[in-house]
Amino acid sequence: MASSVLPGFLVACIGYACGFARSLAAALGSELVEVYAKNFPDGESYVRVEAEAKGRVTLAVFTGYPEPSRRLVEGLLLVEALKGLGSYGVVAFPLYLPYSRQDRRFLRGEPVSVRAVLVSLAAAGADMLATVDVHKPESLNWFPGPTLNLDPAPVFSDALVRELGGERLHVIAPDRGALGRARRLAELLDAAHDYLEKRRDRVTGEVVFKPKTLDLKSATIVVVDDILSTGGTLAKAVNSLVRHGAQRVVAAITHCLMVGDAVKKLEESGLDKLYCLNTVKPSWHRAVVLDAGALAAAGVREMAATLYGYESEAPR
């Protein structure tokens, strides 16, 4: 089966996702093609892949923000175009998976949006799906083929050790749902971890966050989460941590969407530094953007070898 495959992956990317894709292609030792994309006057999307894909395993790398509906359609069209060019296999690779937070029916009559997205990518021609730190990993079970959910903790750990290695670090999740992310990062940093409990002051009605167990005095706190949207939760968490004695607070957020007045909230919160991955383009000039493209290479290579019996060697 693998004998019909031409050597080398083809990594095809759209827009901002090309920074990540460039690092991924370099780590795979593969060809990179930046896809031509435009909008027609009526608002419909158009893409064109100007590369030879026949007989190759191709990666369709795109991101779901900003304009998630438009980005999703571009991603679907890219997958279909690569399949139409005769790809041996197509890996859909949304760096930030749009609609991932609607992973169940919260109200009667609502869709499970992430399921619709995953099924659509498969219908367009994707055999495999890779993404970065999806909101709920179990939601990827709706994709009918193999999936890869990249853990950003090693990228954040490297940056934090490099810049804050001499400080006493505590890793904090803003809620219990993000505790797994905090635990994984804390293990790499050899640091303690905890999560914040949300409580409402019975006198003032104010919602406050309090660490569940840790004493934060004189520690540098790393708040870790998958998505920064409007910034409200992170800003309140930072304020609370500072009030509880944290020496300083930094945040490690995978997807920094920075919606609305998020920048203003963060600037007023006392946050010392924000680390983001290059899955979406953050709008805050103080954000430290970390390249996670090379992180994906080993996982992609292993998935392709398992599904297609196909390997691509990294450059020597």
Image (cartoon, grey):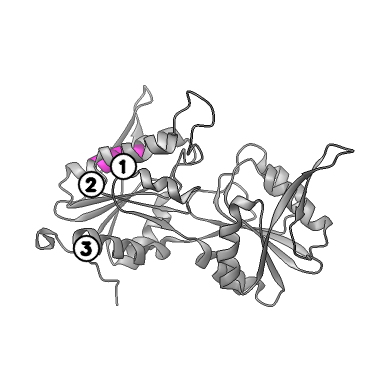
Which residue does the numbered mark 3 point to in the structure image? 8
Circles 2 and 3: CB atoms closer than 8 Å: no
Q: Say what secondary structure mark 3 lies in.
A: loop
Image location of residue 111, percent across then percent down: 44, 29
Give the residue at x 72% y 48%: 235
Residue pointed to by mark 1: 36
Question: Residue at position x 73%, y 67% from top?
Answer: 220
Magenta stretch? Answer: 74-80
Front residue of this view, candidates 55 and 299: 299
Q: CA distance from mark 1 to mark 2?
A: 8 Å
Rendering coords of residue 69 (x, y %): 43, 33
Identify the mark nearer the N-term, 1 or 2.
Answer: 1
Q: Which residue is mark 2?
A: 50
In percent of width and height, residue 242 lies at 80, 57
**Gap between marks 3 and 1, in whole Å?**
22 Å
The image quarter in which residue 201 lies: top right
Task: Report if the CB atoms under discs 1 and 2 are less than 8 Å apart.
Answer: yes
Between circles 2 and 3, the one closer to the viewer is 3
In the structure shown, which secondary structural element does the residue marked by tag 2 occupy? loop
